[in-house]
């Protein structure tokens, strides 16, 4: 069916600058190659815990299929508040929490609520592409802080420089443990970043969706040090293998939650009630917690196998602190190809699918991302194929 000709050019003008998710687009390309091992998407290969699935079934049997209150059922907001206190020493009331349709919706609601057309937002790179996409849709000016020369960590001095150069900036977005690099920050480093941010009148949007998946030290939230200006975003997709359930959270001071909640109300109304019931079990059940810890230890084993093997093949890889990604530098003999062409070559000749670094910022044309959220058998075979490719 064709659109009426006179309507073809009447869409939101911001859409002209967006073509979709570069991660999903390359994954589709890789998926078209027969026999490929896909290390592309950030999706846990584990199934959701049985206790959570059973809770959803019970909720359906109990006809929990009617509208939820907009910000989420009280039981789930209370469970998340207790989770934040237990894991990260954060003090939020249930009224300071919104249950969203995944962390992606939390990002959209927050950016929409705090910016006006023409406002500047600062994004610490490498970054999840939705930050830029939502910024463009809201007609924001987007400034980037590249960390390619600092091991993918933003230095307080670089942060201060960016804030001084953009004193009118409305918000800053930071994600850690980082997608795509797996790099995170020690408690001392988080405190140093917070000390800089606290000097400026700027919203801090802290995407900590991978906060429960850490290897070298316990995750520290920026909200511990500067809660009065931080919007903390997280969810259950990664830590609980619940990507398709779409359960995300916003935690922020009540005045922020009330404003962000308006965007939440008029875009999605609220999360599905029976899914929220299951999410309560996901947060409270001890067996689910043990299952999640097993997942994290399995990711650690995969990382500890794959990283040394790739380094032996000549790939430069930073120390990985969390999440389930490797952000590797393209070896010198292939670097002139750039990220996109190297990843296409690897897909075609080695039948291993990875994501070009440019999906996470224009400064990362010399890098590519591997997701090790797949079986150890797939990882071993992928390493063997990459080895053969490199040694041709």
Image: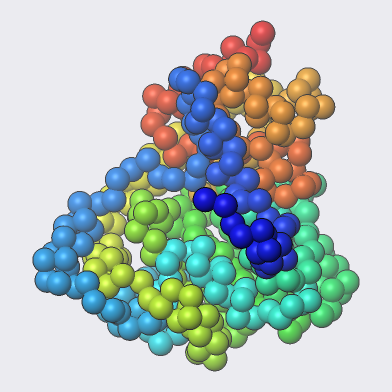
Residue 375 quadrant: top left
Q: Is residue 144 left or right of residue 135?
A: right
Is 64 above or below relative to 356? below
Please say whether residue 75 is visible from this viewpoint: yes
Is 315 above or below relative to 54? above
Q: At x 70% / y 33%, what residue is drawn?
A: 340
Question: In the image shown, does 345 or 285 lie closer to the viewer?
Answer: 345
Is 269 above or below relative to 391? below
Is 161 above or below relative to 203? above
Residue 259 quadrant: bottom right
Farthest residue, direction top: 392
Percent x, y of residue 207: 56, 64
Question: In the image shown, does 389 or 85 lie closer to the viewer?
Answer: 389
Q: Is residue 4 left or right of residue 261?
A: right
Tell me the quarter of the image containing the C terminus: top right
Q: At x 40% / y 28%, what residue is drawn?
A: 376
Q: At x 65% / y 70%, what residue is drawn?
A: 191
Question: In the image shown, does 98 or 87 lie closer to the viewer?
Answer: 98
Please say whether residue 220 is visible from this viewpoint: no
Percent x, y of residue 351: 54, 20
Farthest residue, direction left: 61
Farthest residue, direction bottom: 255
């Amino acid at each position: 069916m064709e659109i009426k000709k006179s309507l073809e050019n009447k869409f939101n003008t911001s859409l002209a600058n967006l073509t979709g998710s570069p991660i999903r687009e390359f994954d589709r390309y890789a998926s078209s190659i027969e026999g490929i091992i896909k290390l592309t998407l950030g999706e846990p290969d584990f199934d959701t815990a049985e206790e959570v699935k059973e809770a959803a079934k019970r909720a359906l049997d109990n006809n929990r299929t009617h509208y939820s209150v907009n910000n989420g059922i009280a039981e789930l907001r209370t469970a998340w508040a207790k989770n934040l206190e237990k894991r990260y020493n954060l003090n939020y009331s249930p009224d300071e929490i919104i249950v969203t349709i995944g962390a992606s919706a939390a990002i959209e609601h927050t950016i929409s609520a705090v910016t006006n057309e023409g406002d500047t937002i600062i994004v610490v790179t490498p970054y999840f592409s939705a930050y830029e996409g939502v910024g463009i849709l809201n007609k924001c000016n987007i400034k980037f802080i590249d960390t390619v020369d600092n091991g993918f960590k933003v230095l307080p001095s670089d942060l201060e420089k960016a804030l001084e150069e953009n004193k009118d900036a409305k918000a800053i977005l930071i994600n850690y443990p980082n997608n795509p690099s797996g790099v995170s920050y020690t408690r001392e480093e988080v405190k140093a970043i917070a000390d800089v941010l606290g000097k400026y009148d700027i919203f801090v949007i802290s995407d900590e969706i991978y906060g429960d998946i850490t290897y070298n030290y316990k995750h520290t939230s920026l909200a511990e040090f500067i809660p009065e200006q931080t919007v903390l975003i997280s969810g259950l997709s990664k830590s609980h293998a619940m990507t398709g359930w779409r359960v995300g959270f916003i935690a922020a001071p009540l005045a922020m939650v009330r404003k962000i909640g308006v965007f939440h109300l008029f875009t999605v109304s609220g999360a599905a009630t029976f899914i929220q019931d299951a999410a309560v079990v996901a947060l409270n059940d001890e067996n689910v917690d043990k299952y999640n810890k097993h997942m994290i230890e399995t990711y650690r084993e995969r990382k500890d196998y794959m990283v040394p093997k790739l380094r032996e093949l000549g790939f430069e890889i930073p120390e990985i602190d969390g999440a389930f990604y490797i952000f590797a530098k393209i070896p010198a003999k292939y670097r002139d190809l750039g990220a996109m062409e190297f990843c296409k070559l690897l897909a075609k000749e080695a039948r291993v699918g990875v994501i070009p670094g440019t999906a996470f910022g224009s400064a990362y044309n010399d890098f590519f991302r591997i997701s090790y959220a797949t079986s150890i058998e797939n990882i071993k075979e992928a390493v063997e194929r990459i080895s053969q490719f490199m040694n041709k």
